[in-house]
Amino acid sequence: MATGLAVTMVRAMHQNIVGPRMREARKQAQPRINQEELAARLQVMGSNLTQSAISKIEQQRRPVYDFEVLPLARALGTSVAWLLGEVDTGSGASAPSSRPLS
């Protein structure tokens, strides 16, 4: 029984795989994007993620829902594949870019 509890606690600690990439993309953007700016970009796109939710996602304390992934990638100027860890950071082509949002 203790093993099951330990597994549950580990899962609760890491509720997404997107968070670390979100933080990396924000910090690599030129100019850098803070959490409040990301929340504002997402709101314009119709996604209602607050700065607090973004913080929790980046800390892997909140899950990321499927309908949130595409707006996050667009607001950060990267691909969904990169955000989900499907493309290596060093690939260049799918890493965050500083291109303007359209």
Image (spheres, rainbow, N blue to C red):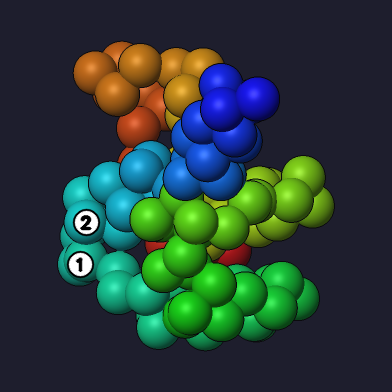
Q: Amino acid at mark 2?
A: Lys
Q: Is residue 13 above or below residue 57?
A: above
Q: Dot 2 corresponds to which residue?
A: 27
Residue sitting at 40 percent across and 56 percent down? 58
The N terminus: image quadrant = top right
In front: label 1 or label 2:
2
Tag count: 2
* Residue 77 in the image, given as x and y percentages of width and height: 45, 50
Q: Is residue 54 above or below residue 86?
A: below
Q: Would residue 73 appear left or right of 35 to someone viewing this image?
A: right
Q: Is residue 16 above or below residue 52?
A: above
Q: Would residue 67 appear left or right of 10 to someone viewing this image?
A: right
Q: Dot 1 corresponds to which residue?
A: 31
Residue sitting at 48 percent across and 79 percent down? 52
SS label for mark 1 = loop
SS label for mark 2 = helix
* Residue 97 in the image, given as x and y percentages of width and height: 33, 45
- The quadrant holding residue 50 is bottom right
* Label 1 CA crowd tier, 10 Å (few <14, some 14–19, many 20+): few
Q: Disc 1 vs disc 2: Cβ atoms closer than 8 Å?
A: no
Residue sitting at 36 percent across and 43 percent down? 20
- Front residue of 61 and 6: 6
- Give me the C-alpha separation between circle 1 and circle 2: 8 Å
* Residue 63 in the image, given as x and y percentages of width and height: 63, 51
Residue sitting at 54 percent across and 72 percent down? 53
Residue 54 in sight from this viewpoint: yes
Q: Is residue 50 above or below residue 65?
A: below
Taking the view exactly as shown, the residue that stands out farthest to the front is: 1
- Front residue of 27 and 63: 63
- Front residue of 2 and 69: 2
Q: Amino acid at mark 1?
A: Pro
